[in-house]
Image (tube, helix red, strand yellow):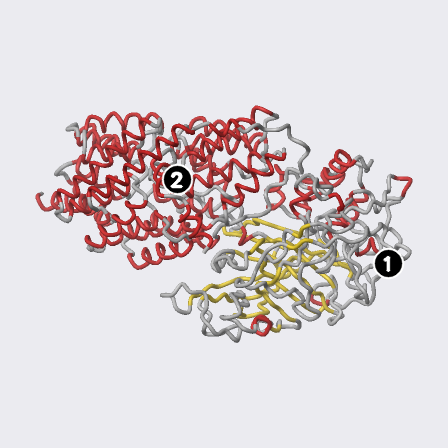
Amino acid sequence: MQARRLFAVALTFALALAVFAATRGDERAAAGRAGTVSAAAPSLRPDADTDAQVRRLQAAVRRGAAREAELAAAYLQKARESGDPSFYSRADGVLGRALARGPEDPAELVEAAALAAGRHEFREAVRLARRARSLAPGSNAAYPVLVDALVELGRYRDAERALQRMIDRKPTLPAYARVSYFRELTGDLRGAAAALRLAVAAGGPVPENFAYVQSLLGSLELNRGRLAASRRAYAAALVAVPGYAPAEAGRARLAARSGDLRGAIRRWRSLVARLPLPEYVIGLGEAELAAGRVRAGRADLALVRAQERLLDDAGVNTDVELAIYEADHGDQLRAVRLARVAWRQAPSVRSADALGWALTRSGDRRAGLRWARRALRLGSLDPTFRYHAGIAAGDTPEGRRHLRLALRHGLGAHPLHANRARAALEDR
Amino acid sequence: MRRSKALAAASVAALAAGSLAVSGVFGSSHREAPRIMLDPAADNTDVYAFTAKDAPGSLTVVANWIPFEDPAGGPYFGKLDPRARYYVKIDNTGDGVEDVAYRWDFKNKFRRPDSFLYARPTVTTADDPDVNFVQTYDLYRETYDKDGDLKHTKQVGDDLIVAPDNVGPKTIPNYEAVSNDAIAPVKGGGKTFVGPADDPFFIDLGAVFDGINIDKPGRPNIGLGNQGGGKDDVASYNTHSFVLQVPESRVTRNGRSVKDMKSSNAVIALWSTTERKRMSVRRHNGRKHYKPDWVQVSRLGEPLINEVIIPAGDKDKFNRTSPADDRANFGKYALNPEPARLLNALFGLGVKETDRKDIVQALLTGLPGLTQIGKNPVPADTLKLNLGVPPAATENRFGVLGGDMAGFPNGRRLADDVTDIELRVIAGALLPADKGGKQIPLGDGVDQNDKPFRSTFPYVALATDGFSGTVKRTEPAHAPVPQPPTTGMTTPPSGMTTP
């Protein structure tokens, strides 16, 4: 990508972010009328069109129907689909009014829990989800967010218990997808793929959900080295939701993994032009560096920094992936600081990995290795976790083992790091 | 198409603003798997059971799965799940436990795996090579012992074809012929069909779920819902119909056909279920205490029970439990139905709100002399059908309330107006006047399906095609229809009203 064009995209992005910051909380202005009697039936219509759903529910709530929880759920789904955080504020507004009105409603609590999790307030999410579950023990609704929040908090035993109950009660796409993630965390990639295939077969009411699990399957098969299966899964996701970003990103990684760096760069570029997420910009920049296009790579990677600042200004939670970016391409001390914040919010294996890598890159390899081992305590075969541990362990049997595992399980999709891992193995 | 447009409509700027922010969806900050537990592929929408005019001596069942299939929607959504099991279960002893069940297992395949096109012109048969995405099924008949344990399984249909989706007239010029081509014989007698069909249900959902909002502002002429004006929210949506016609002897308690409506084997009770595979989170441990590997994720007996009678917090529980346990789990909701309180709060009708044994009887134990199995049946949400009642020469959409004994709640025909019937029963139509009985002509203002049903197997109306499909239909206004209806109200059979 031409640096100038990329800069233009970033500028658009900055403007949009500013608009978002300025209009936050506007939703609260819409007054809620006293609710009349409602049959309180859940929406029967699993409509594929989230926008239509939002409009319908907005109208219902405006008429005074007590359907705020459903509207909040639609806003949160919309946030999933568009990535637009203003939908979080809208969900917040509508839930705030409903919860203030009372009495305590389990459906509203579940949505509030989901909102808290979306904002990385995982402890609050657990509290709200548990409260909802105790109010409606027959309902399954609180389980998905409860499981997610427990996983982020690193409470894997509790998460496993809740997830087992969830899938025993209703084995369906959200349950299968979570089982898959749990198995992936424990290094059971075959089992993870089996669960994802059940999720794909089950499908869901919203095309995005289907595309999501197909994309996960694509990444998993990529890491397992089953490139044809990976390609098929990404293609299926893109049929369900044309242009679906996670699947496009997956295809860029797949190209890199297949040794087609030019193809990978082309795919990253077109994706970044549309959606300049740090994750994607990093993918582009690292592919360029791996291809020897050092200037372009550095210019693109510099953009992540700008995005990071914008995020801070918008009061948005920083994130482990930014810590890893700083560790790889920026200020290592800043990386450590960011990773520590992430760990406090979400003491998960992911945060442990980020903190470990930040420490390793800042020069403290001993501490880095300690945290890297912590990240691997469940047995994960995540290629970046293994790569980070391998570099931290240095030229030791342990270090070589981690690097080989990383390369065997998909590090090739991250060409810059794959090259470094191979070089490290050859040097030794 | 609609989907891609919606995506394009989101401007780059808005997308960019969102994307970086809070959510872990696009960024990999944490894996946020979907939360929506709605499960259309496993969602059984309705069960119908009746004796068809052209098939006396046989049971005809229509069980539908997948609600609100948009005819123009992507053909890969709302596909039947090849990893799930689909059942119609039959209790012929009145204990709420299945004695006979039919099970459908599906397989998917792409004829041209490199293409994602659903079908190309011109499709002339159900198994046409121009259809790319093909679903097939095996059909099994299962028998169960008294405790509900599986005794015997027999395959009665092998590698049968699911009718293709009605993509449009260019791809499938004669859809009726293609759809009918999917009809197959059942081993041991009978016929089977599985495929998309126009959803036979008709209801003003918007009104019913908006607090039975019949008397809407801006719709002054709808009255109590008995003079049209309702908007059929299901019109022009498709569903997947499983239509099965088998000799009575395959489903009755003694394995014989039914002589008349008084015969001891005359009444059977039906419901549909969907099961999915459960798994242990950790693959290699804890396997042993998961004996039954299949979990029921959805069930349906009588219409609107889970929607109207079961409160929100218990709907999931309803879907995973058995009809045999309905009294313990949900009996109180039938005895003191929320809609009765709602009707009083909204319209001040003075409907009896508690101790509604008449509703328990009509819905759960069966009407004595008509749909009750044996002397002391277990209260269960199952659709009860007396196979000894001959089909009506002229159907009345109010069924038994309209003096037509061959209709709901004796079984359920495609054209039975179950919404109006249930609203009226809740208002007290089955109670004697001195016990709080009230004849109030309630309804949702929708009286019939948007498409006529077919007179021969598989009876359901043809699926709306994706090319010309438009959704929704408004019932034209008409003169108020009184309750009880003037047509054919004869003397009710004994037990029709609660003593």
The label on residue B487 is 1
In the image, B287: left or right of A9?
A: right
Q: Residues within 10 Å of mark 2 (few under 14, many from 20)?
A: many
Could you tell me residue B244's position as x and y percent? 65, 66
Residue B153 falls in image quadrant: bottom right
Image vertical order of residue A65 relative to residue B297, above or below? above
Could you tell me residue B87's position as x and y percent? 60, 58
Q: Amino acid at mark 2?
A: Gly
Where disc 1 sits, the SS reads loop
Q: Report if residue A264 is visible in the image.
A: yes
Mark 2 — residue? Answer: A83
In the image, B356: left or right of B36?
A: right
In the image, B248 versus A333, the foreground residue is A333
Could you tell me residue A68's position as x and y percent? 56, 34
In the image, A109 versus B397, the foreground residue is B397
In the image, B448: left or right of A183?
A: right
Q: Amino acid at mark 1?
A: Thr
Could you tell me residue A252's position as x and y percent? 27, 51
The label on residue B392 is none
Identity of the residue drawn at 78% across and 44% down:
B224
Identity of the residue drawn at 82% across and 59% down:
B405
In the image, B103 versus B396, the foreground residue is B396
Residue A356 falls in image quadrant: top left
Residue B391 falls in image quadrant: bottom right
Q: In the rendered image, which quarter contains the N terminus of chain B? A: bottom left
Q: Report if residue A157 is visible in the image.
A: no
